[in-house]
Image (cartoon, rainbow, N blue to C red):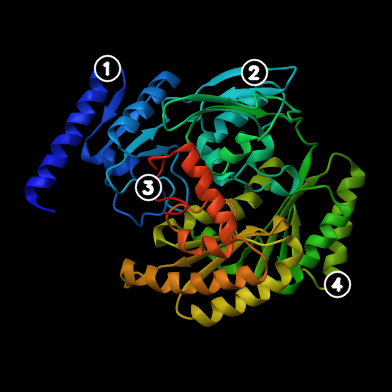
Amino acid sequence: MTGNASSAEASATVGALDELRRAQPNLRLLTAAADLEHYGRDWTRRWTPAPLAIALPATIAEVQAIARWANVQGIAIVPSGGRTGLSGGAVAASGELVVSFERMNRVLDFNPVDRTLTVQPGIALEAVHKAAAEYGLIYPVDFAARGSCSIGGNISTNAGGIRVIRYGNTREWIAGLKLVTANGDLLELNRGLIKNSSGYDLRQLVIGAEGTLGLVVEATLRLTDPPPASQVMLFAVPEMSALMRVFAACRKRLNLSAFEFFTDRALHHVLAHGAQKPFDEISPYYVVTEFDAADEAQQQAALEVFEQCLNDGFVNDGVLSQSDAQAAALWRLREGITESLAPYKPYKNDISVRISAVPDFLDEMSSLLTREYPQFDVVWFGHIGDGNLHINVLKPAELADADFVAQCERVTKLLSEVLARHGGSISAEHGIGLVKKPYLAGTRSPAEIELMRGVRRVFDPHGLMNPGKLFD
């Protein structure tokens, strides 16, 4: 490209932004370099942010105006929430307009009869939890990033979290959506209905679409009753093969709301980050589980499960929470892992298999990672009760970022082949984004991918909604 051509394009882009300013004088637009960097990336940190500008709409009408302007100008849009994703789904690295929903962060309505909460997409998950609690109900989707992730982002990735085993993923709790399409139309999907068999459920297409089908501008969330009083139990597990045996024993006797695991390396980093050591002796694996304990019989059942697992050799130590503070301390051992690893710029895999496939998959995956990563610190943890595992490979300080990623990508290709053999997914709860595009074919058949492309073309014929994400 010649210098003159580049200059002409830049001038045209500036003119397009000026036109948007004139058409929407109350729309907040940011162009400072620090803002472009802040809003142009997510937790992957693997791409240099290079957005055109940042738009912060406050109303649905402003979002529609942005979409119509982008459609006419041929300028791509990247939706932005809390940007806590790990797949590059919120990265803007090619001159896109970032549409941040941080100003659209309010609760709009509570319906006590339908037991629904209608919210704007920029509201944090933790704020939703607090709002539901004010009405004596809960929104049960939950995970460690609750304070910074947004509902819009949760919807775009069909987020799961720590209580999927009991409550399912985000899509089970979305009663209705409002969506602004690429041409600026406003669609109201499902309208909060429980039963609705009037054709295709476009709401479910939008959930997990990573912003490629339009911009979610409002969501109606289903709420439910709080669970009974619960307790948390931490097990020290001597070998990997015992993990699913402990799960089977717990699921048989207890009403589980969570069943999580982590390795000794994960514990090492969390303890270094300030958590309290749970046992004197170190075990290679740990399980933290939460279960109903509203009466003495349920509490006794938990003790009996521990004794059974101890006698069978599935665990070699354990602790049962006796207070809310102790339960929080035990949960910190699991929920503090991601934060404790952040300084190491980890390369992350977020994978899933059927629960029944977990034992065989763990064996094969463990052998693969031991063989291919002999020199790296590899930290595992995850929602083993629903088949979702997180693999974190920590970058040595002396290794260049590009070389580190290249080595990890080579192993991810091998891992994707293992997943395909076990019928698994390369993305359990963070989407495909930019990071996992090369491995989509291991999860979806060519016919499925072509149908997905067709759906995307119908919703966004000019390819302006989060382009480059999911597939090219």
3 and 4 marks in contact (CB < 8 Å): no
- Horizontal side of 318 relative to 161 (left or right) equals right
* Front residue of this view, candidates 178 and 134: 178
Q: Which mark is residue 312?
A: 4
- SS assignment at label 3: loop
Mark 1 → mark 4, Cα distance in angstroms: 70 Å
Cα–Cα gap, marks 3 and 4? 49 Å
- Identified at 86% across, 72% down, the residue is 312
Image height check: is 99 above or below 394? above
Which residue is painted at 77% across and 30% down in the image? 225
Of labels 1 and 2, earlier in sequence is: 1
Mark 4 secondary-structure assignment: loop
Instruction: Identify the residue position indicated by label 1 in the image.
Output: 25
Of the two numbered discs 1 and 4 in the rendering, the one whose residue sits closer to the viewer:
1
* Quadrant assignment for the C terminus: bottom left
Amino acid beneath label 3: Val
Labels 2 and 3: the sequence-earlier one: 3
| SS type, badge 2 | strand
Q: Quadrant of residue 19?
A: top left
Residue density around tag 2, few if under 14, some if 14–19, many if 20 or more, within 10 Å: some
Tell whether label 2 touches label 1 (CB within 8 Å).
no
Q: Residue furthest left?
A: 4
User: x, y percentage for residue 343?
Assistant: 40, 58
